[in-house]
Amino acid sequence: MDYQNRAGSKFGGGGVASTSATNADRRERLRKLALETIDLDKDPYFFKNHVGSFECRLCLTVHQNDGSYLAHTQGRKHQTNLARRAAREQKEGRAGTDPVTGLPIGMVGAQVSVRKNIVKIGRPGYKITKIRDPVTRQQGLLFQLQYPEISPDVQPKVRFMSAYEQKVDDPPDKNFQYMLVAAEPYETCGFKLQAREVDRTNDRFWTWWDSDLKEFWVQVMFKTEREERYSGVPGLAPSGLPRR
């Protein structure tokens, strides 16, 4: 088909691009431009939801792929919301945040440089023991981790993470959760656990750091099926406790 005689086209060209083709080319150019300036891993407004789509927490928009999100960050709506937030924070007297890292502007350089200078020396040794409460019949796990080369004045930290927060197992399995233990200069350890509710009452969940032996202990007790099913129901005593 001959396109060269169409209105607005040059001799030897393929005719005037359609509106959809023009928009697709514009989005691709914006995506390439954003890739040069934005790191999605450090973007505080970038969020991947449980269905695999991408959300902008600043503009409350949903995108089907990362290219669409990157093109959105270069658009007028996102840039306008960034300017509004910066103006509001300045008016309220709060320090401005870097749009890429989400950290205060005065701390971005120093904090990033400290992280880059930390050399990981591997994973710590650990031992896991299955435990059970003889009274309540609750099941649990006892973790023992060794940190002989831990940095001075550093204590290990514990955090629980849902299956949708991690990026190792894809697709995520809602039947599992993850317990993370971090201590510099060691790599962060992740333990894959059943997605059962952790009992934090009566010191059933506790951590202890032995600074002399350089050992970190974590006890995790899971609620029984009865407690998970009737949790919060008035008039029902927890398992193992006498009813009045």
Image (cartoon, rainbow, N blue to C red):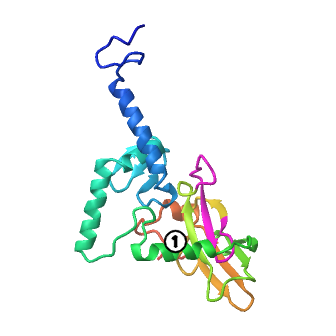
**Residue 138 appears at what percent x and percent y?**
63, 69
Q: Which residues are magenta?
A: 167-190
| Residue reaching furthest to the bottom | 212
Q: Residue sitting at 63 percent across and 54 percent down?
A: 168
**Residue 71 appears at what percent x and percent y?**
40, 45
What main secondary structure does the magenta stretch of the protein show? Answer: loop
Residue 162's image quarter?
bottom right
Three-letter code, disc 1: Pro
Q: Is residue 122 left or right of residue 221?
A: right
Labels in figure, total: 1
Q: Nearer the viewer, residue 192 or 132?
A: 192
Quadrant of the image for the N terminus?
Answer: top left
| Residue reaching furthest to the top | 1
Q: Residue sitting at 59 percent across and 54 percent down?
A: 167
Residue 187's image quarter?
bottom right
Work out whether 74 lies above or below 183. above
Q: Is residue 82 left or right of residue 120?
A: left
Q: Nearer the viewer, residue 57 or 229?
A: 57
Q: Is residue 53 visible?
A: no
Q: Nearer the viewer, residue 48 or 43?
A: 43
Q: Residue sitting at 34 percent across and 23 percent down?
A: 18
- Residue position marked by numbered label 1 in the rendering: 238
Q: Residue sitting at 36 percent across and 27 percent down?
A: 20
**Residue 237 appears at what percent x and percent y?**
48, 72
Q: Nearer the viewer, residue 235 or 174?
A: 174
Q: Is residue 145 visible?
A: yes
